[in-house]
Image (cartoon, grey):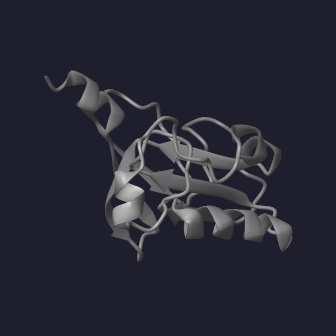
Amino acid sequence: MNFSEVVAGTRQTISSDNNIDEGESKNDGLQRCVIVGASHAGVNCAFALRKQGFEGSIVVIDTDEYLPYHRPPLSKAYLDTPVDEPPLKIKSENAYAKANITLMLGFKVMDVNVHNKLLDMHLLKTLRQSVH
């Protein structure tokens, strides 16, 4: 994967060429898994891969800027509940680090090129901060 430096409001491309950045070393030929969407299913998929012995890099990409959290089903009772505290996180930040799972939060996948194994992403965080 090629993770180039993120510049405000630019599009980024992730490829499967095993380059971390131009001029840097290869990833020892390990496989890579990119999961688009940090929902309950996406996060559990990443941790299940580790539990099953997957040794390659795992990247979870999501448009939300916060650690993945539980999204309860909507109901009238839930909507009437006051929001006093943030939603419960699916896993702690430490759990992702311990499992060597990379979170790319605040990114929107714009295009998936399966043939060339490329993802075209747009950084959303900077755009939100610059919009008034």
Q: Position of residue 3 (x, y in %)?
A: 52, 42
Residue pushed farthest left?
132
Q: In which quarter of the image is the C terminus?
A: top left
Q: Quadrant of residue 77?
A: bottom left
Residue depicted at 31% across the width and 28% down the height: 126
In the image, residue 132 sits, relative to residue 4, either above or below, namely above
Residue at 42% from the left image edge and 50% from the top image edge: 81
Q: Nearer the viewer, residue 107 or 5?
A: 107
Q: How many marks?
A: 0
Please state if 80 lies on the left or on the right of 29 as rendered. Answer: left
Tell me where residue 69 appears, x and y as whole percent. 55, 51
Q: Residue at x 42, y 59 (%)?
A: 78
User: Relative to residue 15, is residue 10 drawn left or right?
Assistant: left
Name the quadrant containing residue 12: top left
**In the picture shown, does residue 79 fall above or below 94?**
below
Q: In this view, does 120 lie above or below 122?
A: below
Q: Is residue 60 left or right of residue 119?
A: right
Q: Position of residue 121 (x, y in %)?
A: 35, 50
